[in-house]
Image (spheres, rainbow, N blue to C red):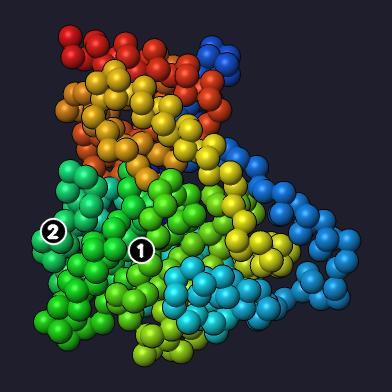
Amino acid sequence: MAISRKVREQMNDSSWIRRMFEEGIELRKIHGAENVFDLSLGNPLLEPPDEFRTQLARLLANETPGTHRYMPNGGFPEVRASVAEVLAEESGVPITGAEILMTVGAAGAINTILRSILDQDDEVVLIAPYFAEYIFYVQHQAGVVKEAQCDENWIPDIESLEAAIGPRTRAVIINSPNNPTGVIYPDSSIRAIAKTLQRAEEKYGIEIYLISDEPYRKLIYSDAPYPFIFDHHKRSVVATSHSKDLGLAGERIGYAAVNPYDPGKNDLMDALNFSLRTLGFVNAPALMQRAVAGIQRATVDIDIYRKKRDLLHGALTDIGYECVKPDGAFYLFPKSPIPDETDFVAQLQKELVLVVPGVGFGTPGFFRASYCVDDWVIEGSIEGFRKVFQKTRG
């Protein structure tokens, strides 16, 4: 056996998204790329805004000495200050650069946070449906995953969350806007989650971190203010990236923001800096730090994603699919017309339409369709969705 048993098991468990990706490659070879309608991947379609190119060109034309050298592990102080300024403005919480850690994307932020707070067999609660990679992030840091559930509108079920928390709970991860549902957890839900954590802390004599994964925070289609976690639970950390809001997924740039009200924030920041270094990230990419520092208020054109959401959601619900209309991100999570959504996905694949079964997100019976694709992909998929729906409903 050339690789570890644990990694082999994890590779098998994570095979759904990888399998759909590989199937898409093969189908394109056989049928031509223009005839395959791949809604399986969350790969941002939109190019970075003009502000990014302007900033990048300016940096390259006027590089200051030391631009590409090592810096403090947490990032350039002036970059952290710029990020904190805008985050404080958005959240209404007095965050400073001292509470910001620049990271290699949101994934790097979450792994760094978990490395900093977990001991062997400590538990982390995930709320299904959830981004499947969370499981492996927890396992890589010797943690144990526990699951809580959502209601029919994809809002966290507080009773389920309370039942999932025990004396070994160290963190709860939430993701809003959510991948795969696109639902935004309302402020009332965040408040209820925080109170549940605080009751558990008192009951078990422990400290529980609320980790909020927010890479879609600026991809929101309503005018309602985003419900930040900081005012609700002192032991809270935000992990985010600019993969989606600036279209920079391949550049791997994000940050972690520690709640300034956390009485243990200094210890946590020290641990985050140490973990970032010893996990092998060392620091976030230097050029990308400087590039995003001055464009924290910029985003891609969100209206383009809104129109794609409306196109796909309208078409599927007209056919008869049941689907909560999302307020953010770029995914739909409809109910499968048959109980076994893996069979449904296989039938859809025969029509050259690719989606991901809900079992890959901890919620069987549903499927994820990504609309961060060209309109022709969405439009071309509709007939396949119709044929399989009618066939399965017979």
Check disc 2: other Cα within 10 Å, few if <14, some if 14-19, many if 20+. some
Q: Quadrant of residue 120?
A: bottom left
- The local secondary structure at tag 1 comes to loop
Q: Is residue 34 above or below residue 19?
A: above
Residue at the (19%, 24%) spot, across then down: 338
Type of the residue with mark 1? Pro
Q: Is residue 183 above or below residue 297?
A: above
**Residue 290 shows up from this direction:** yes
Describe residue 130's horizontal placement relative to residue 188 as left or right.
right
Q: Quadrant of residue 201?
A: bottom left
Describe residue 34's horizontal placement relative to residue 390 as left or right.
right
Quadrant of the frame with the C terminus: top left
Residue at the (39%, 12%) spot, across then down: 383
Residue 353, position in %: x, y?
42, 21
The residue closer to the viewer here, 165 or 12, is 165
- The local secondary structure at tag 2 comes to helix
Type of the residue with mark 2? Ser
Name the mark on residue 160: 2
Q: Which residue is mark 1?
A: 227
Residue 342, position in %: x, y?
27, 28
- Check the image and name the residue furthest to the right: 61
Residue 154, position in %: x, y?
24, 47
